[in-house]
Amino acid sequence: MPSRDGPATHRIARAGVSSYPRSVARSNDEVAALLAEYADLISITGGDAFKARVYEKAARSVGGHPADVSALDAKGLREIPNVGASIAEKILEYVRTGRVSAVEELRAKIPAGVRRLTRIPTLGPKKAWVLYEELGISSVEELAEAIRDQRLRDLKGFGPRTEENILHGIELLRSSSDRVLLDVAAGLAEDVLAALSQVPGCLRSAYAGSLRRMRETVGDIDVLTAAVDPEPLMAAFTELPDVTEVVAHGRKKSTVRTTKGLSVDLRVVPPDAWGAALQYFTGAKAHNIRTREIAVHQKLRLSEYGLFDAETGEKIVSKTEEEVYARLGLPWIPPTLREDRGEIEAGLRGELPDLVEESRIRGDLHTHTDLTDGLAPLEEMVAAAARRGYAYYAVTDHGPALAMQRMTDERMLAQRAQVRALDGVYGRRGRRRSGGGMRLLHGVELNIGPDGSVDWPEDFLAGFDLCVASVHSHFNQSHREQTRRLVRACENPYVNIIGHPTTRIIGRRPALDADWDEVFAACARTGTALEINARPDRLDLRDEDILRARRHGVKFAVDSDAHAVIHLAAMRYGVGTAQRGWLTGDDVINTWPEARLRRFLRKGRTRRGAGRPAA
DNA sequence: GCCGTTTTCGGCCCGACTGTTTTCAGTCG
């Protein structure tokens, strides 16, 4: 994609627009990024704030739109929310020419670095513009230097605390800028695999490395292929459309840099070395060191080419990972566990967990509609959930405490009536066929206030089938206050799930400062589940927290927190994170049959009718 | 620039927090 902003557009700290599943054409992402950039440029230059907001909203709608925008005509485009005549025309221009003149004009006025300044937390478009206009600052580096030289002191609206906050923001930006979010890496890797698998002579292909292990961020992508003759694969690889630079080009290994700023390594191995190579390149390094040590103790030698007799050099096994692990006395270890966090010992004892898998997820318990900040109407979200084969599905729009969502009792109750009506349709529909239908749960995402209270009193909450409760503000409370707040939310008999518990946003916002062991203990004690929010920029709880919470006996819910149909597919990243936390199906409430789930949702409630479906 | 039980113009999510101010602008969710 032609972008003045360059490759860093997709880096974590500035991943403003990102649509995770690959079922969506990439042109939607490109157009969304362009519209978002235009919105930023309007804001920075002091343009009409409402106009900027429309472009922002249009960017989100396009990013979340299920159809490929490059295949739509003007009429089709205008059916996308927030896309009218003007934006439709710009999208058509982009599809036709690869550029949008209005965006080009604004880009000519503002160096790309100025927009990058707004990625610094606490530094918005207005301050960025002042810095550029008054001091000519157009990069993060220049800004850091200007602060060192105390040149911000004389600017109106900039004081010592502002300097401090900006410096802290720059630190945050820098510490995360060399890795990308999981969905960006997965999308690129899947594109590369799709292209390489078409090359004649390509016998197998897969991605390995931290992406296969589903680490929350990815530094570069390792792609592995099996072929007798590597040349055609290497040639095709270095000529992929995403490639901006060929860093290395050899027979066994090539490295390229891509438009997303991410490096991709391709390794071509002989077909009979596939298993050993996949094991080797999946890592993690610490896991590989352990497996090689085990090999050495057995007078063996393990490399990417196979497992060999250390003395004779004779190859023993190499075709599959299973064979390699088996010969070492280990069961096959799922990639998400390969971090040397006890998986070797557990494997040796035959006690690896029976990990939760995406196919075992029976429903999504945290999703939104356009009643609040979602993009799709209830009917569309529910239809999409049914297509995923779920046995149950919860609609959990925001309560009134998030003032921006304009929720009222009446609107919530009206939605409930709609949900009940749809439940009648979907529940029955399935029962007539085989295997049962999809039951709909009416829920809410409550806001946890600074004191731990939530949006509604208990008698109103009793009407919901389930309540997710999450923190959306007051991130800087003291350790003690934050802990008390979360514990109090758990103690509410109607709160079933703590949504995105730490509220961290990868590369942009740190986790809340709380006594998590105390919070986890409260969850276990009160029968409150912790969410594993599957959005790639959240993945909250993260793997280490899950491991810790699990020891308290907490149950978990892996939720997409979908705000659009396509976001439902983010479930895979949540499941990957749950696996990294060693969770089994029994640990995850939304793998349970409906009846068991409903029992869990009743929690400590005394009132009858709470948590039950309407007849 | 988009949208409409507010309907072809006049609104557009709105409240809290922070840091800068002395009455408010910028940022965030």
Image (tube, coloured by chain):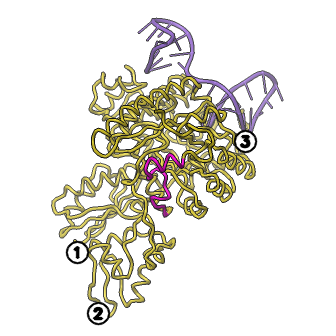
Chain colours: A yellow, B purple
Residue most extreme to the bottom:
A311
Query: In screen coordinates, is A93 left or right of A126?
Result: left
Q: Earlier in the sequence, mark 2 or mark 1?
A: 1
Viewer can see residue A334: yes
Q: Which residue appears at 46% of the width and 61% of the height?
A: A584
Quarter placement of the N terminus of chain A: top left
Sequence-wise, the earlier of marks 2 and 3 is 2
Count of picture labels? 3
Q: Chain of mark 1?
A: A
User: Does residue A597 belong to the magenta stretch?
Assistant: yes
Residue A480 appears at what percent x and percent y? 75, 52
Chain ID, mark 2: A
Q: Which mark is residue A312?
A: 2
Does A51 sit above or below residue A22? above
Q: Residue at x 44, y 53 (%)?
A: A591
Residue A451, numbered circle: 3
**Residue indicated by mark 1:** A272
A437 left or right of A108 in image: left
Q: At 59% from the left edge and 25% from the top edge, which residue is drawn?
A: A408
Q: Nearer the viewer, residue A531 or A526?
A: A526
User: Could you give the CA–CA distance between mark 2 and mark 1, rounded to whole angstroms?
Assistant: 19 Å
